[in-house]
Image (cartoon, rainbow, N blue to C red):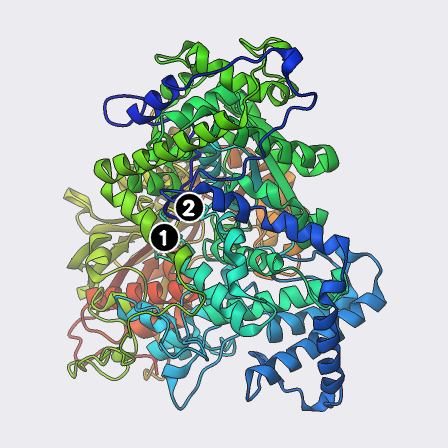
């Protein structure tokens, strides 16, 4: 079974060593002797060998697999011919059901975690009872199958309002691990907490004598992720300081706020043949904001031939064993399935089993209205659940499967997904180029006869789907991709549907939907492409450029090593009808009379040569790339495991000692928040302390002399954000601390700039470098002139940016929040949503009050919104713009500025420096100004980006700041707390910047007053 899981979908072939062609393959085909048979002697109906996927047979006998792989079709035929064979089972099940009906409904215990019972039989009984009630209700309320239920695992699609209550019950009580997730927390023993997301945590199986392998995180943060509970929305700012609350709420909150997967969205299967650019297309689609394209482990094709060994999958024990095997198979995939953070996925077997069981119960009772369904539907249910989890964990709306042979299972797919959701992308390539690519790649079959027959078989499956369900299929020709990628990809994008942002991305300052060119470049620069190319040299083509792609057209004829005339005659004899039907003109076999017909002895010889070629190919792979070889073997070994729960090495139950040594130099209040940041960063998020430290720009505490004996002790900290899908994204925040010279040596400017857009980092740096000097160059002998200088400086910088040679500000810009101090006079200017906050003593002088000295500029402000509309702009949410009912009820969706001519620029602000496209819609750079005279009651002044204020109020910011004597310590605590809250809410962080000053009065004594 070694080769069963090998993928062979590169955009083109790969060379082995110095030669482009495997010696073993070449010799085998050159040694093949053809026998031309006269047309008059040929049979009236030429027998076409139906080729199943035997290219993955490794060193084993392919004949056995040929028989096994027809099992599904044979089983289907037998079931349609008669149902007498199942009469005994039906009778037995009916009698058992009659007994079950005597149990009163009141005894069914249903919780948010599913169905509780003292035994698996009782649990199954109660679950089926609820499913029956659900199915009976929906059958009576609607007649059309596709509009009955909203199934969280993607079985049925509907928007029927009358079923919402029942579906919510199904999601919360029965279907665990799909879209809505329930969580439990055993207060007496937290280690027994169960997370039912279907991923991340493995729970020991109830019937396993040996404990299945559970996730063993390498760090405290990941270990704590396994324990989750419901998020208490009643908690206020000050209540969210406890790390225990963070650890308990993290997973639930993340799923609640960033779950973008849509169980009703269309899902996509690539069909056709391997070696037709499917890997290129997969990685390209994965670079879209809303489509997940994992490397396919070929679940269906690998397990359908051996499905019988798992027994009747309606039996819970058997289903759990199959789930365990398939999950292990996927976890061992040669190209790992990772979440958006780059962590390898580990699946929760129990929740997946429950979800698949419920899916098939609904399918059985509602779609087929029978007592049993084929085992294949249970396998497809597992397949669907794992792909859903992958999309969910990568914040994608839907997914695409690249296993090209899924066309064989169209009948299963159409019943499971229905026409509402099922879609196909049919890849077509000249079969002679396909054959040559196979022959030069350490992948698949090694004889032209086998390759050609398999290609014909897969095309026939695909063409049948196209003829019966044309609306479900979009055809993509490989040659068109090479000649004009933009047009081809535009058509594919239109077929897939409108691009949509994930819930995290929807919160960005500016919405820029990736253009076709960006999606195309993602095929070789995206995470999936890079990951695959590093792990196996068969995927190196993914990162190659345009010059390489140009060489992939008609290689069979004009390439450096074209197909020989003898082999071409063999190929075209088999391919003639199908390739002609697809529009490819034969080169040698110009009419049917030229075709070869092969006798049984020749066919046996070809199969034998193919088997030898596969063995030689795998041996060469073992020598050339042992890591690739053994990773494939490690995965393929799972297929040979006996049908029982997979035994794994026992892992220690005891958690590492996570108690930290208490720092008694800190007060109890200080210990509530991260201090000495980034110490212990790993327990708050995905980055280590060293990784956080490398992202930080620190300005040590400095002292500035003000008039009247006042002093300002200032420190600053700027931390680059963490974006799971853009791990190397530049820090777009900039901070400025500047002191005047000469006559102006007692003038100071402190400013925070928060950039956005593709060139946001460059824009914020440009504004930082220009602002202070442009203000200082003016004659500032009165408050009015200072204010005018600040306004003029912002506008001038904005105008200069639009003419800058090296900075494109069409969709990029920055906020600017600055504090300009002369004596004790503070001039605060603001553009955007960064803030200046003042902490002052209350009249009682026993506590501080916080006051924001700036106003955010957003379309939510009526005056700002009116200006935008007057300038010809449009103000609405992204959901309203796209007429997306899915987000109509999302109260957090922010209004944005759009052009009436298209879905751009989508700014969440109404003033900024830069953003020249938005400027034509009324988004301008004129700042709002405030003036404040520092007085004896003032204690703290803060400038910060929305990386700080997004999840913290001004009162909490001042409260944390007041706990320390050194402003740098306050900065660290605030940045650490901001980071922690971002990870709670969104599992990513914005850039976080803060400038913080303590105001020292003349002859000031005693400690700073803290907010109680």
Q: Residue at x 35, y 41 (%)?
A: 532
Vertical side of 893 occupied by 221: above or below: below
Residue 369 image position (x, y, % from top left) = 77, 64
Pointer 1: what residue? 635
Residue shown at 34%/27% (left/top)? Answer: 14
- Residue 559 left/right relative to 119: left
For mark 1, give the secondary structure.
helix
| Mark 2 crowd level (few <14, some 14–19, many ≥20, 10 Å Cα) | many
Q: Is residue 859 above or below residue 593?
A: below
In this orientation, which residue lies closer to the viewer: 606 or 832? Answer: 606
Determine crowd level at label 1: few under 14, some 14-19, many 20+ residues with C-alpha closer than 10 A: many
Marker count (numbered): 2
Toward the viewer: 935 or 949?
949
Question: Going 32% across and 53% down the picture, which residue do you hit?
Answer: 634
Q: Earlier in the sequence, mark 1 or mark 2?
A: 2
Q: Is 267 placed left or right of 742 in the picture?
A: right
Residue holding disc 2:
5
Side of 328 where 593 appears, left or right: right
Q: CA distance from mark 1 to mark 2?
A: 8 Å
Q: Do the residues under discs 1 and 2 have CB atoms within 8 angstroms? A: yes
Residues 364 and 588: in front is 588
- Residue 792 in which image quadrant: top left
Q: Position of residue 531 (x, y in %)?
A: 34, 43
Can see residue 517? no
Residue 1008 on image: x %, y %:
23, 77
Q: Which mark is residue 186?
A: none
Above or below, comparing residue 74 to residue 476 in the picture: below
Can you see residue 568?
yes
Q: Residue 701 location in percent, x, y?
A: 16, 61
Q: Quadrant of the C terminus?
A: bottom left
Q: Secondary structure at mark 2?
A: helix
């Amino acid at each position: 079974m070694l080769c069963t899981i090998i993928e062979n979908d590169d955009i083109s072939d790969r060379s082995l060593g110095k030669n482009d062609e495997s010696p073993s393959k070449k010799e085998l085909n050159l040694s093949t002797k053809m026998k031309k048979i006269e047309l008059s002697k040929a049979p009236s109906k030429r027998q076409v060998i139906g080729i199943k996927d035997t290219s993955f047979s490794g060193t084993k006998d392919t004949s056995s697999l040929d028989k096994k792989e027809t099992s599904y079709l044979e089983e289907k035929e037998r079931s349609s011919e008669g149902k007498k064979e199942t009469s005994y089972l039906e009778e037995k099940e009916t009698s058992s059901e009659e007994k079950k009906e005597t149990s009163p409904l009141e005894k069914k215990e249903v919780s948010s975690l599913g169905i509780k019972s003292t035994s698996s039989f009782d649990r199954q009984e109660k679950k089926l009872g609820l499913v029956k009630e659900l199915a009976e209700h929906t059958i009576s309320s609607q007649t059309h199958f596709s509009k009955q239920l909203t199934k969280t695992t993607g079985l049925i699609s509907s928007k029927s309002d009358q079923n919402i209550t029942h579906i919510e019950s199904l999601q919360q009580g029965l279907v665990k691990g799909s879209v809505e997730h329930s969580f439990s927390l055993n207060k007496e023993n937290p280690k027994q907490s169960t997370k039912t997301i279907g991923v991340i945590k493995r729970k020991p199986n109830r019937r396993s004598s040996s404990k299945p392998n559970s996730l063993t995180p390498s760090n405290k943060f990941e270990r704590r992720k396994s324990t989750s509970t419901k998020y208490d929305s009643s908690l206020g700012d000050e209540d969210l300081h406890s790390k225990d609350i963070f650890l308990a709420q993290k997973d639930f909150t993340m799923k609640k706020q960033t779950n973008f997967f849509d169980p009703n969205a269309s899902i996509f299967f690539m069909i056709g043949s391997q070696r037709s650019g499917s890997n290129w297309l997969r990685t390209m689609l994965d670079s879209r904001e809303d489509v997940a394209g994992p490397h396919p482990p070929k679940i269906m094709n690998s397990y359908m031939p051996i499905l019988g060994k798992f027994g009747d999958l309606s039996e819970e024990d058997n289903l759990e064993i199959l789930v365990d095997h398939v999950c292990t198979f996927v976890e061992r995939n040669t190209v790992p399935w990772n979440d958006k953070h780059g962590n390898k996925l580990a699946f929760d077997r129990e929740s997946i089993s429950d979800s698949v069981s419920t899916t098939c119960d609904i399918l059985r009772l509602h779609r087929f209205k029978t007592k049993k369904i084929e085992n294949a539907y249970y396998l497809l249910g597992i397949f669907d659940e794992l792909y859903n989890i992958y999309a969910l964990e990568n914040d994608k709306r839907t997914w695409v499967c690249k296993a090209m042979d899924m066309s064989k299972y169209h009948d299963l797919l159409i019943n499971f997904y229905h026409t509402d959701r099922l879609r196909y992308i049919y890849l077509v390539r000249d079969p002679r180029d396909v054959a040559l690519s196979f022959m030069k790649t350490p992948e698949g079959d090694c004889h032209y006869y086998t390759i050609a027959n398999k290609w014909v078989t897969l095309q026939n499956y695909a063409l049948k789907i196209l003829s019966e369900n044309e609306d479900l299929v979009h055809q993509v020709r490989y040659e068109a991709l090479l000649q004009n990628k933009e047009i081809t990809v535009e058509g594919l994008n239109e077929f897939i549907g409108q691009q949509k942002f994930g819930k995290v991305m929807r919160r960005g300052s500016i919405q820029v939907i990736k253009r076709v060119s960006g999606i195309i470049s993602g095929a070789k620069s995206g995470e999936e492409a890079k990951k695959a190319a590093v792990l196996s040299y068969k995927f190196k083509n993914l990162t190659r450029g345009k010059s390489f792609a140009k060489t992939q057209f008609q290689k069979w004829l004009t390439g450096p090593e074209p197909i020989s005339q003898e082999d071409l005659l063999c190929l075209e004899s088999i391919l003639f009808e199908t390739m002609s039907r697809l529009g490819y003109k034969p080169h040698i076999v110009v009419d049917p009379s030229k075709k070869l017909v092969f006798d049984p002895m020749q066919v046996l010889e070809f199969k034998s040569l193919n088997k030898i070629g596969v063995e030689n190919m795998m041996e060469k792979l073992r020598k050339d790339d042992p890591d690739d070889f053994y990773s494939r073997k490690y995965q393929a070994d799972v297929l040979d495991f006996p049908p029982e729960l997979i035994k794994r090495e026992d892992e220690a139950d005891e958690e590492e000692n996570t108690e930290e040594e208490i720092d008694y130099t800190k007060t109890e209040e200080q210990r509530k928040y991260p201090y000495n940041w980034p110490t212990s960063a790993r327990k708050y998020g995905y980055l280590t302390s060293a990784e956080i430290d490398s992202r930080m720009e620190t300005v040590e505490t400095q002292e500035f002399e003000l008039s009247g004996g006042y002093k300002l002790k200032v420190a600053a900290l700027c931390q680059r954000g963490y974006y799971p899908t853009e791990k190397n994204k530049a820090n777009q925040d900039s901070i400025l601390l500047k002191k005047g010279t000469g006559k102006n040596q007692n003038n100071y400017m402190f400013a925070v700039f928060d950039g956005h857009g593709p060139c946001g980092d460059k824009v914020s740096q440009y504004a930082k470098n220009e602002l202070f000097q442009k203000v200082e160059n003016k004659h500032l002998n009165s408050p009015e002139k200072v204010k005018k200088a600040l306004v003029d400086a912002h506008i001038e910088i904005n105008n200069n940016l639009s003419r800058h040679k090296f900075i494109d500000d069409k969709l990029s810009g920055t906020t600017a929040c600055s504090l300009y101090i002369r004596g004790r006079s503070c001039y605060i200017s603001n553009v955007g949503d960064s803030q200046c906050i003042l902490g002052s003593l209350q009249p009682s002088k026993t506590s501080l009050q916080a006051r924001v000295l700036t106003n955010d500029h957003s379309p939510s402000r009526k005056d700002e919104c009116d200006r935008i509309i007057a300038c010809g702009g449009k103000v609405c949410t992204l959901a309203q713009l796209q007429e997306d009912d899915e987000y109509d009820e999302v109260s957090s969706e922010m209004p944005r500025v759009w052009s009436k001519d298209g879905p751009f620029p989508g700014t969440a602000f109404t003033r900024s420096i830069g953003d020249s496209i938005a400027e034509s819609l009324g988004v301008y750079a004129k700042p709002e100004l405030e003036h404040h005279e520092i007085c004896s009651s003032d204690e703290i002044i803060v400038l910060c980006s929305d990386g700080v204020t997004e999840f913290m109020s001004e009162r909490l910011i001042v409260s944390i700041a007041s706990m320390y004597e050194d402003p740098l310590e306050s900065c660290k605590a605030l940045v650490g707390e901001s980071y922690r809250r971002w990870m709670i809410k969104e599992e990513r962080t914005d850039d976080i910047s803060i400038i913080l000053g303590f105001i020292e009065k003349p002859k000031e004594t005693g400690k700073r007053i803290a907010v109680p």
